[in-house]
Image (cartoon, rainbow, N blue to C red):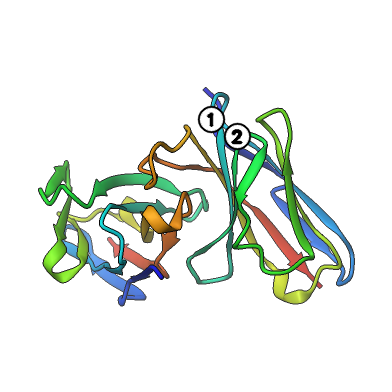
Amino acid sequence: AQKVTQAQTEISVVEKEDVTLDCVYETRDTTYYLFWYKQPPSGELVFLIRRNSFDEQNEISGRYSWNFQKSTSSFNFTITASQVVDSAVYFCALSGETSGSRLTFGEGTQLTVNP
Amino acid sequence: GAGVSQSPSNKVTEKGKDVELRCDPISGHTALYWYRQRLGQGLEFLIYFQGNSAPDKSGLPSDRFSAERTGESVSTLTIQRTQQEDSAVYLCASSLAASGSAPSVEQFFGPGTRLTVL
């Protein structure tokens, strides 16, 4: 069975602080994919990143960066110099060979960035 | 182009009634997914369509839930004899056909239908 754990239910920071959202996953698949989605108050999920299990290179996109470590089964997400517009629920998700096309989501982390 | 659309955006119904939720995927997307999101929780997979067939229905919680897709386009999720525990946001997503055994393609999500069963 696949599982995604986002241990941080809620995080509150002040604008311009850096913040890291943790994601730990469990899978027996050799080939799998990890995703991060953002769900702003409007409710619509917005895709942020996809990473496959064979690519452990970290990725940076503007203020966002992701750290994938297979050794610890983690795929953490860091927002640098956070802004109020970053306030949202962030979901980590996993798909793999045995799960077919379904995404297995974590419970989400509610990030609040205060001015 | 237009994204995934869902209707209605909100639905309030009485326990025991049937409801139909509609999803219009992005044009050209052959894969379509339904998820359920209970208040304050993550998304639970319900069903996946590739074209008009549903190779994976394993997430449907009971036989009161069914879904169909026609014309490789619109999909309808039907919940019969609704119960209060069915109250949730129902999200639809679409994607290009997943290739290989581990789907890597991005799923694009609609705004969801908020279902409240009184």
Of the 4 image quadrants, the one containing the C terminus of chain A is bottom left
What residue did someone put label 2 on? Answer: B25
What's under tag 1, amino acid-wise?
His
- Judged from the image, the secondary structure of the residue bearing numbered disc 2 is loop
Q: Nearer the viewer, mark 1 or mark 2?
A: 1
- Kindly indicate whether the residues beneath marks 1 and 2 are on one polypeptide chain: yes
- Looking at the rendering, which quadrant does residue A68 occupy? bottom left
Q: For residue A68, which numbered disc appears in the image?
A: none
Residue B87, image x, y percentages: 70, 69
Pointer 1 residue = B29
Camera-side residue: A104 or A10?
A: A104
Residue B18 in the image: above or below residue A8 = above
Viewed as shown, does residue A18 lie left or right of A105? Answer: left
Give the amino acid at mark 2: Pro
* Residue drawn at 29 percent across, 71 percent down: A12
Check if mark 1's residue and mark 2's residue have beta carbons within 8 Å. yes
Residue A9 appears in which quarter of the rendering?
A: bottom left
In the image, residue B2 lies at what x, y percent?
A: 55, 27
Q: Residues within 10 Å of mark 1 (few under 14, many from 20)?
A: some
Q: Along the line of sight, which residue is nearer the eye, B9 or B94?
A: B94
Relative height, residue B99 to residue B58 (above, below): above
> SS of the residue at dot 1?
loop
